[in-house]
Image: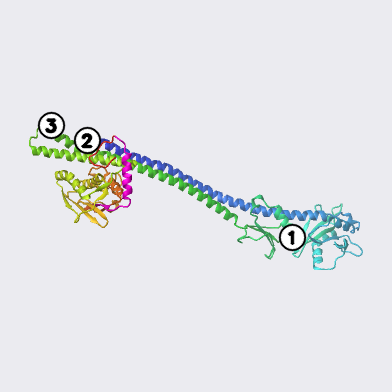
């Protein structure tokens, strides 16, 4: 493949990745904007619903009080029309005793006294005759003078005046006199055939009857279905704002929610209604908050799902871009050693090199580049095994010093070709043998040395130290290169990750080396650490425990994995298996 075409293809992939990212954000905006509009419309609708709901409940309360007052009025009108509707001849013919039988048959509860008042003059009663009905003896008799009798005379005086003037009244109706709040009187004017007033029949009302019988009955019969489960409290207050009746007690007394005066009798009294637990406005507000909270929660869940999907898609696109970079870098990594091998191989095949030292030198170049290719391929195969969970190791007792020495010798030719030299610092005392996979450990050290060469930034010295620290054996590789920013130290061990420094992007690599090193070290129950300063270099240290826990168990697992390995696996220069 031509380099120009490769660069062109990679450029297309980057542009395509940018377009896909823009489309992803455009799709997110296309979902988010309608969601916000929907939330705004729903909020507006809920506000209107809250207001209309409060008004509807307030109207329901007003209607309830109106129904109660109408029921009270109907009760008193019905009783008055039934009891006080006395024939006119009882007055015109002087037969008031007939009213006794009428009151006896039509008797009514809730009246202190029943009475008749004839306006037709008699010898003994020139100004009219007032008789009270005594229910104990069922007789009519003149009453003793009292403030109540005085109130009755005062209430009947307008009708008596009409009788004296012989005025006609075509539509006589029930009237109420409440000038004295202690004596409330219902009057029914009686007219003869000529529509002239001849007398009145009346009753003095009993407030206790209203409190004990009429109001409770009216409240219960007027109760709408809306308040069946949570019946509000109805109270009655007199003209002096004294509470004269209460249907119950509110758990949380508060402001009155609705009030209404009686329309027929006891017109200076008023009914007041209050909810037991919460006012209609509070109920509407709670419903509003519950609905808006549910809407926000659903919108939040939907938005979270969108963000999660966007994040997943973005990570997938980032991973895809990293894989594209990986393919590009691996292509470069493969092409360079292959080109060197081909050139040196052609020189040897054509016989252009006759000097034995040159032949040996070219052979070393070919071997070094072959090992470099092998290392790169091993990294790719190991990464595939790690990703699929099929990576296994051959643990055995081995000397760490021998593994380090052999690895450094393998790198010696390549380092010499690149102008690098290694400063090796061995242990002060012999190290114990460790249970490890020599090939995998060598691969880890090779990856660290390869990174040190790539990111040297002109520094040609690489320091390798092997020592014992407490209960661990430490292999440290230090370079004098570009270093790693502090905020990216934890990310460099991730697959395909490349440090965001511009110089790093000029260096080709697969982005798998450190990820594989970490996996190998963790499989040995060890740990991988890094110390770095930008512009001063980095130090990578492999810490291997001398006596790791579970070593014997790992030996058994290694033997089992060897028994389950698939036959026909191609041998590799290093013992680590794919």
Q: Which residue is mark 1?
A: 212
Which is more N-terminal, label 1 or label 3?
1
Query: Residue at 14% across / 33% down in the picture?
Result: 346
Q: Where is 74 relative to 137, above or below?
A: above
Q: CA distance from mark 2 to mark 1?
A: 105 Å
Q: Residue 531: which quarter of the image?
A: bottom left
Q: Position of residue 415 (x, y in %)?
A: 16, 45
In this picture, residue 354 sits left or right of residue 169:
left
Q: CA distance from mark 2 to mark 3?
A: 27 Å
Nearer the observer, disc 2 or disc 1? 2
Q: CA distance from mark 3 to mark 1?
A: 126 Å
Q: Residue 139: which quarter of the image?
A: bottom right
Query: Residue at 72% across / 55% down in the picture?
Result: 218
Does the stretch in magenta take in 552?
yes
Residues packed near mark 2 inside 10 Å, few (<14), some (14 to 19) or many (20 plus): few
Does the stretch in magenta take in 499?
no
Q: Which residue is mark 3?
A: 349
Q: Position of residue 275 (x, y in %)?
A: 62, 57
| Model colouring | rainbow
Q: Which residue is mark 2?
A: 3
The label on residue 521 is none
Q: Position of residue 468 (x, y in %)?
A: 23, 55
Q: Secondary structure at mark 2?
A: helix
Q: Secondary structure at mark 3?
A: helix
Query: Residue at 61% across / 50% down in the picture?
Result: 56
Q: Which residues are magenta?
A: 539-567
Extreme residue toward the top, this view: 350
Which is more N-terminal, label 1 or label 2?
2
């Amino acid at each position: 493949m031509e380099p120009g075409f490769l660069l062109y293809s990679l450029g297309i992939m980057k542009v395509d990745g940018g377009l896909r990212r823009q489309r992803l954000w455009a799709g997110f905006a296309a979902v988010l904007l309608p969601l916000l509009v929907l939330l705004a419309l729903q909020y507006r609708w809920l506000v209107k619903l809250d207001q209309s709901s409060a008004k509807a409940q307030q109207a329901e309360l007003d209607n309830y009080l109106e129904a109660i007052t109408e029921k009270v009025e109907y009760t008193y009108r019905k009783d008055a029309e039934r009891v006080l509707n006395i024939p006119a001849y009882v007055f015109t013919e002087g037969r008031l005793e007939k009213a006794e039988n009428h009151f006896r048959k039509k008797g009514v509860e809730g009246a202190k006294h029943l009475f008749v008042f004839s306006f037709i003059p008699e010898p003994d009663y020139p100004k009219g005759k007032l008789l009270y009905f005594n229910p104990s003896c069922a007789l009519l008799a003149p009453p003793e003078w009292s403030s109540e009798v005085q109130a009755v005379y005062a209430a009947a005086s307008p009708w008596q005046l009409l009788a004296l003037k012989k005025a006609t009244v075509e539509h006589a109706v029930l009237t109420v006199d409440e000038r004295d709040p202690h004596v409330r009187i219902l009057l029914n004017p009686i007219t003869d055939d000529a529509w002239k007033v001849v007398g009145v029949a009346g009753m003095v009302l009993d407030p206790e009857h209203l409190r004990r019988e009429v109001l409770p009955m009216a409240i219960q019969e007027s109760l709408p279905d809306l308040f069946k489960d949570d019946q509000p409290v109805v109270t009655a207050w007199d003209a002096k704002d004294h509470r004269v009746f209460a249907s119950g007690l509110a758990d949380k007394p508060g402001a009155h929610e609705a009030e209404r005066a009686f329309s027929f009798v006891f017109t200076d009294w008023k009914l007041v209604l209050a909810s037991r637990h919460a006012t209609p406005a509070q109920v509407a507000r709670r419903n509003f908050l519950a609905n808006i909270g549910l809407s926000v929660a659903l919108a939040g869940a939907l938005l979270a799902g969108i963000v999660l999907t966007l994040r997943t898609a973005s990570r997938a696109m980032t991973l895809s871009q990293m894989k594209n970079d990986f393919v590009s870098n691996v292509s470069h990594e493969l092409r360079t050693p292959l080109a060197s091998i081909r050139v040196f191989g052609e020189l040897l095949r054509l016989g252009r090199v006759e000097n034995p030292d040159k032949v040996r030198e070219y052979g070393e170049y070919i071997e070094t580049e072959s090992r470099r290719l092998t290392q790169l391929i091993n990294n790719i195969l190991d990464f595939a095994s790690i990703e699929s969970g099929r990576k296994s190791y051959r643990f055995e007792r081995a000397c760490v010093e021998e593994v380090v020495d052999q690895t450094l010798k393998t790198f010696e030719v390549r380092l010499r070709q690149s102008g690098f030299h290694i400063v090796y610092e061995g242990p002060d005392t012999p190290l114990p043998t460790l249970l490890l996979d020599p090939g995998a450990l060598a691969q880890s050290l090779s990856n660290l040395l390869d990174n040190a060469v790539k990111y040297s930034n002109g520094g040609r010295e690489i320091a390798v130290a092997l020592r014992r620290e407490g209960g661990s054996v430490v292999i440290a590789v230090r370079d004098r290169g570009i270093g790693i920013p502090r905020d990216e130290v934890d990310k460099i061990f991730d697959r395909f990750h490349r440090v965001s420094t511009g110089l790093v992007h000029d260096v080709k690599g697969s982005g798998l080396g450190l990820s594989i090193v970490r996996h190998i070290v963790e499989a040995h129950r060890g740990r991988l650490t890094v110390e770095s300063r930008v512009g001063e270099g980095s130090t990578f240290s492999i810490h291997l425990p001398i006596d790791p826990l579970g070593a014997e168990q790992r030996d058994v697992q290694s033997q089992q994995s060897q028994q389950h390995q698939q036959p026909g696996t191609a041998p590799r220069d290093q013992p680590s298996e794919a």
